[in-house]
Amino acid sequence: PAPPLPPPVLLSAVAPPAPAAGAPCASAPAVTALVSALCAPSLTSVTRQAPVAGGTKRVDILATNVAHGGFFHWLTSHFAPCAFVVFECKNYSVDVANVEVDQLLGRLSANYGLVGFLVCRKVDDLPRLLTRCVEAASKKQGYVIVLTDGDLADLAVEAQSGQDFPLLRKK
């Protein structure tokens, strides 16, 4: 098989031409490849359209957390169990709202993992979205980490120095 593409090349494939409200994430395959490249070997078995909740629900991207160091180990050690990490991708031209946060939270569980990433184009009202995420965490519903296109670019740079991901620790 061909060697995996470097994160900067994978990152260039993430941005589709036209985000739209309510549209499925056209870049989910590219985000899957980017997550695989950035987070290996901490996250393995990165799968698109993975069934969860006994097959009654699907997630855009699911990864198995086998980290023995770095951000994903730190996350499990200090905040929440996350044997699996969920990524939901939204290709919206407007901010994600409660329904998208609730959708992601509905895919998290104590047995499965309480950490999910909401990957979206951009966020205009970040304080409002973060309030939703903090409220969910304070109710012990799970941890939602929002990643924008800009964050993905920053993570591609950070990954060149290892898997500690300072940006993710701040979020």
Image: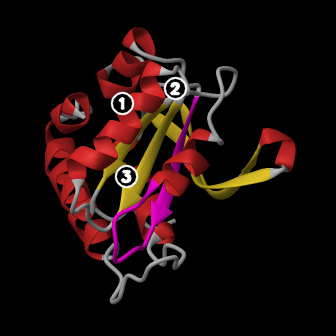
Q: Quadrant of residue 71?
A: top left
Which callout, 1 or 3, points to the residue nearer the camera?
1
Residue matched to label 1: 134
Q: Amino acid at mark 2?
A: Val
Residue 80: mark: none
Whole-percent x and y of residue 155? 21, 48
Residue matched to label 3: 37
- Disc 2 versus disc 3: distance between alpha carbons? 15 Å
Q: Amino acid at mark 1?
A: Val
- Disc 1 versus disc 3: distance between alpha carbons? 28 Å
Q: Is residue 129 left or right of residue 20?
A: left
88 within the magenta span: yes
Q: Quadrant of residue 10?
A: bottom left
92 within the magenta span: yes
**Mark 1 or mark 2: whose residue is earlier in sequence:** 2
- Disc 1 versus disc 2: distance between alpha carbons? 26 Å
- Bounds of the magenta span? 84-97
Q: Residues within 10 Å of mark 3 (few under 14, many from 20)?
A: many
